[in-house]
Image (cartoon, helix red, strand yellow):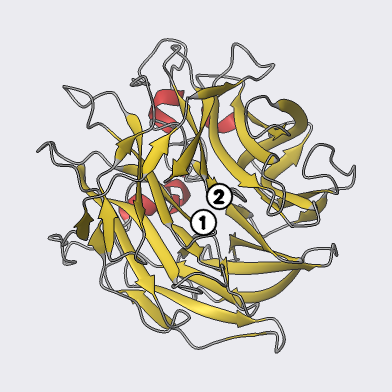
Amino acid sequence: MFKAFNMGVKPFITIILLGFVFLNANAQSDIAFVDLDKENDAIAGPNIPIKSQFVSNPVVEPSISAHPSDNNILLASAMIVTDEERPYQSCRLSSFHSKDGGRTWIETTHNHWGYDPWTAILPDGKAAMSWLGTSGSFRHEFPLNVFTSNNSGKNWDSKVQVFNGLGHGHDGTKLVGFEDSFYLTTVRFNANMGADVVLYESINGGSFKEVAKVDSKGRRLNFCEPAILTDGSVVVPTMYGGGKIWANLYDPKRKQLSETYIISDNPKLGRGYSRMAADTNANSKFTDRIYFVRAVADGTSSKGVWLNYSSDLGKTWSKECRVDLFDNGKLSKANVASVAVNSNGVVGISWVDGQHSADQRSYDVYFTISKDGGKSFQRPIRVTDVSSNPRTEKNADVANKFQPGGHYLGITTRVDGSFQLIWSDSRTGIFKLQTSRIEIE
């Protein structure tokens, strides 16, 4: 999680933690749009609230994962803000399990305090959840914690694996699973306050182990979730705001990283985490195509949702194009973009935008798909049935720290090819979780 506004921590640290400041003034600003697919194949289901026992507290920054072989099982995680005036110092962890495809959920509270929950499930039902922080209370310390479960997150093992770091510790977690393996990326601060991108691996239910590191060489690097390809290799993305966005491929057999492959020399970020996903469907026309997505801003001006993709295992990448193909003439307010690929090779991208609001101060969740490997996208559909303005009394300072409901929102795909979205909005006057299933005709 970007902790840029937490001025109780060393100011210069909080400034560099913000990916938003890494904007290259000389980078290209006029980005072309993708082609328009005039079909309308995505259908949003009803918005379903995910209830928490913390009725009076904002719930923000959710992630979601789906069981790869059981269409009914979903796992989510989120942060409970216990003090609306001190959001960055008061977040505790909850996870949510559904066995009926997202219609009802059971919450598990975890007495862990910090930031950035993320989940993943393997085909055998093993689940993992990553988290930064400490147990029992918030202590301005950010070790990496990994929780594990043998029943898709319905129950969690009592033992939590903890990785300590230097000084500040870590920032951000991203966790993915494929076949029998989990891979997790984070940034870990080193002694000179550079930040390395670190890759952890768990195979066949074993403990997580550090297997690779992208050396910062004194820089503050950034990252997003890795992507696992069908041969087991892992795409490890890295961003540096003063330079480029690149990827290294980790070979689990040889236990080493490849040379660096440039994704983009336009390192703009600005509106939440960037995201990555790979097409691992053997029957797809685009097997092993990798998609990299980000919502971009230049100062206070939104620049839309940008996509790069690779069709040669991450070695070369397309030039970035915008996918937010609105036709109403309103300015972009794109924020917190997410991407996933379903079992048919359809690419789904979601984000938050102000297109339905007359003054664009309220936001909605939007979703679009590509059926041709990212070359063209359909018009975005509105997923939320109620627009949301975060500036409420009950949200207090949470509206400043988590204006779109988090620094990331969740997306996953289910066995039947549908997409499942999760987000936090303020339609009730306080941030609460909502989910929706998107069917593809």
Q: Quadrant of residue 350?
A: top left
Query: Residue 253 at what x, y percent from top left?
Result: 72, 86
Label 2 neighbourhood size at 10 Å, few (<14), some (14-19), many (20+)? many
Question: For mark 1, what is the residue?
Answer: 342
Q: Residue furthest front?
A: 441
Q: Please say whether residue 225 is visible from this viewpoint.
A: yes
Label 1 neighbourhood size at 10 Å, few (<14), some (14-19), many (20+)? many
**Looking at the picture, which amino acid does disc 1 mark?**
Asn
The residues bearing labels 1 and 2 have C-alpha atoms spaced at a distance of: 5 Å
In the image, is 223 to the left or to the right of 101? left
Q: Please say whether residue 118 is visible from this viewpoint.
A: no
Q: Residue at x 40, y 63 (%)?
A: 292
**Looking at the picture, which amino acid does disc 2 mark?**
Thr
Depth order, front residue of 88/104 = 104
Depth order, front residue of 324/40 = 40
As drawn, 190 above or below 48: below
Question: For mark 2, what is the residue?
Answer: 413
Query: Residue 299 at what x, y percent from top left?
Result: 21, 47
As drawn, 319 above or below 74: below
Q: Residue at x 34, y 65 (%)?
A: 372
Are the residues at dot 1 and dot 2 in contact (C-beta closer than 8 Å)? yes
Query: Residue 330 at what x, y percent from top left?
Result: 13, 36
Q: Secondary structure at mark 1?
A: loop
Q: Secondary structure at mark 2?
A: strand
Q: Residue at x 61, y 52 (%)?
A: 168
Query: Residue 237 at what x, y percent from top left?
Result: 48, 69
In the image, is 105 to the left or to the right of 406? right
Q: Which is more N-terminal, label 2 or label 1?
A: 1
Number of callouts: 2
